[in-house]
Image: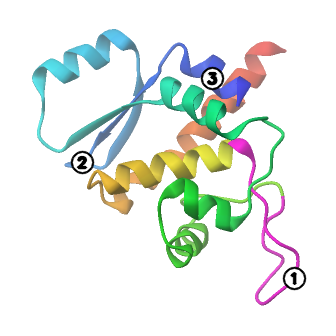
Amino acid sequence: MKRLKEKLKRTPFLVVDVSNGTLALVERNKAASIISERPAGTYMMDLLRGAENFQSLNGSEDRLFSVGDLAVIGGQQLATINDWLRGGYIQCSVRPSAGSGRGRERKASFEDAFVCGTIGALRRAGVALSALAGLKELLQDQVSHAKASRK
């Protein structure tokens, strides 16, 4: 989460344009101009503030999250979270599913849980799930770039 927050300091706002299905992280100045235009079908979220709030509510970055935890964080039914996992919208990167049936419980990282909470908030605001298809990758790219810039 620390790496994600470092990267989000430069481009803290997520902009979702439902009309063309694009997702982008933008700087504060660009976000202000988008807000002033108020285009229909555009949603905006301050991900840096969201990440800070998420961390203050959920504690240590080392904490692991179960699928049940993801349901609570995303504000969705367990079946919906399982659909999101199968569809690749979210992931359990620490301990993925080992196949069908019972077995080891899947575990998600702090970043995985944050993505789930972000998708849940946008879904509750009325954004279609299909418009959020690239969110996981967009945020993972932010973490990867932050890691590379530290080397």
Disc 1 to disc 3, C-alpha distance:
34 Å
Residue 149 sits inside the magenta stretch: no
Nearer the observer, 76 or 118:
76
The reply, left or right, for residue 36 in relation to residue 105 is left
The residue tagged 1 is 103
Pinpoint residue 80: horizontal percent, then vertical percent.
50, 73
The residue tagged 3 is 5
Pinpoint residue 121: horizontal percent, then vertical percent.
40, 49
Residue type at mark 1 is Gly
The picture quadrant where one finds residue 8 is: top right
Tag nearer the camera, 2 or 1: 1
Tag nearer the camera, 2 or 3: 3
Q: Are marks 1 and 3 in contact (CB under 8 Å)?
A: no
Q: Quick check: 31 above or below 122? A: above
Residue at the (70%, 31%) spot, across then down: 1
Residue type at mark 3 is Lys
The reply, left or right, for residue 130 in relation to residue 92 is left
The residue tagged 2 is 20
2 or 3: tag closer to the N-terminus = 3
Residues in magenta, as a range: 95-110
Q: Secondary structure at mark 1?
A: loop
1 or 3: tag closer to the N-terminus = 3
Residue type at mark 2 is Asn
10 Å crowding of disc 1: few (<14), some (14-19), many (20+): few
